[in-house]
Image (spheres, rainbow, N blue to C red):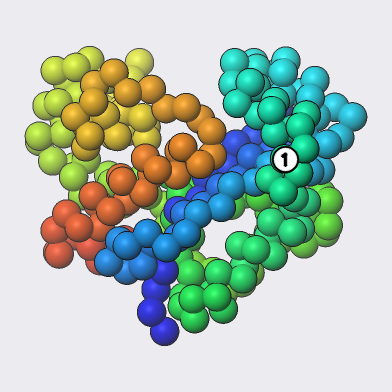
Amino acid sequence: MRNVYVILDTETVTDARFVFDIAWQVYDSKGAFLEEKNYLVSEIVDSVLGIPMLSHDNFTKNKYNNYEDTILSDKREKILTLLEIAEQFNNIQSKYNANVIMCAYNAAFDIKALNQNMQWFYGGDFFDKSIDYLDIMVAAMGTFCATKKYVNWCLSNGFITEKGNIKTSAEIVYRYINDEIDFVESHTALADCDIEAAIFFRAKNYKKKLVKRLASPI
């Protein structure tokens, strides 16, 4: 079976990491775009605490307006239960008759958050056992982020952590590959899929001798 790469991103609210925004984009092995999906999670946004959580949480309150129209209007097709979203995601394999490789930036976070939420609400895991995983951050750090060019670019622009390490967040890496020094990540699921896909395919196509690293699990 061929591979399809599914770039996935989630947005969570509160320290409990309630997942409320999920998106993914599907690409074939050559990088051709096939489809995308984006949903809000009914169990969170339709709950009694949904709107107060999103509109007051320190991380989500500044972007609440991005979601308010969907939550409060009749755009209900964009709001599904977590179980319905999981069924759609896990149907990708049969839909394209392909192996699914789920790719995310810091993939362990998304995997843990989705499985944890699924356990809370339904007592099972979000992902089918046949799904493979790939961490886009690891792929980038094993390819072009390991070059002197990237390191020198970070040094010249002051993209250094408090501990003196080179920054490798998705926002900084996308600034580098897109030559857009002032780019600011929106931290909404579908928009973040765009930048993570760009980073992934930049890493995947970097050098043949390094592509084998992309097959490593998270």
Mark 1, residues whose alpha carbon is within 10 Å: few (<14), some, or many (≥20)? Answer: few
- For the residue marked with disc 1, what is the amino acid? Lys
Q: Which residue is mark 1?
A: 75
Q: Residue at x 89, y 29 (%)?
A: 48
Displayed quadrant of residue 194? top left
Quick one: 69 or 7, which is closer to the camera? 69
Instruction: From this view, report whether residue 40 is shown above or below residue 214.
Output: above
Q: Residue at x 49, y 76 (%)?
A: 96
| Tag 1 secondary structure | loop
Q: How many numbered marks does the figure carry?
A: 1
Quarter of the image with the C terminus in it? bottom left
Q: Is residue 64 left or right of residue 84?
A: left
Q: Is residue 107 visible?
A: yes
Pinpoint residue 33: horizontal percent, then vertical percent. 37, 59
Pinpoint residue 181: horizontal percent, then vertical percent. 24, 21
Quick one: 3 or 46, which is closer to the camera? 46
Instruction: Spot the residue most to the right.
Output: 48
Q: Residue at x 36, y 49 (%)?
A: 197
